Every structure is written in C-alpha cells, then in structure tokens.
Image (cartoon, rainbow, N blue to C red):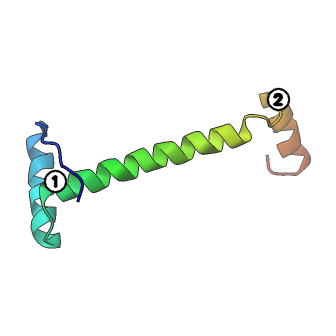
Amino acid sequence: MPQLKRVTVYFDPSLHKALRVKAAHTDRSLSELVNAAVQQTLGEDAQDLATFAERAKEPALSFEDVLKDLRRRGKL
C-alpha cells in the first residue's frame, strides 16, 4: 500500500453531512470517497486532454460553415 498523506480539507456543512451519510451507507470512509472522487475527476481531465491532443491536427471549421452544413443536411 502506498504511503498516505494527511491533509486538511474544509467542506461545506451540507456536503460534509452528505459524505458522512454516503460513507455510512456504502461502508467506506470519507477518505475513500474523497480519493475516489478526485481520481475520477483527474482521470476525466486526463482523458479530455488526450482527446484535445488527438484532435489538434483536425481542420478548424468556421461557425458559418457549420451552420451552412447543418442547413444543407436539413438539421437546422
């Protein structure tokens, strides 16, 4: 198991209550819930950045060209 770091985090009281309730219902600790949420958020960010990098070489389309194409295809 990796060495854990202790930090102080301040939660809005209603959020803290919701976390405590979820922790009780799922039999997980607050730390486990917060770690999972942060990992998910960072993972989504990494996925977004990877997608942006993959699409960086795609040609840029002007807004007007997109509108014309949508009208041509009967979508607008």
- Give the SS element for disc 2: helix
Q: Residue furthest right?
A: 72
Q: Position of residue 53 (x, y in %)?
A: 66, 38
Residue 64 numbered tag: 2
Residue at (55, 43) in percent of width and height:
48
Q: Position of residue 26 (x, y in %)?
A: 17, 71
- The residue tagged with tag 1: helix, strand or loop? helix
Horizontal side, residue 55 vs residue 1: left or right: right
Q: Residue 28: which quarter of the image?
A: bottom left
Q: Residue at x 24, y 54 (%)?
A: 2
Residue positioned 35% across, 51% down in the render:
39
In the picture shown, does residue 10 fall above or below 15? above
**Which residue does the numbered mark 1 point to in the structure image?**
31
Please report the residue visible at 29 percent of the width from the left and 56 percent of the height from the top. Answer: 36
Amino acid beneath label 2:
Glu
> Going from the N terminus, do you reach mark 1 or mark 2 first?
1
Mark 2, other Cα within 10 Å: few <14 / some 14–19 / many ≥20? few
Distance between mark 1 and mark 2 Cα atoms: 49 Å
Q: Nearer the viewer, mark 1 or mark 2?
A: 1
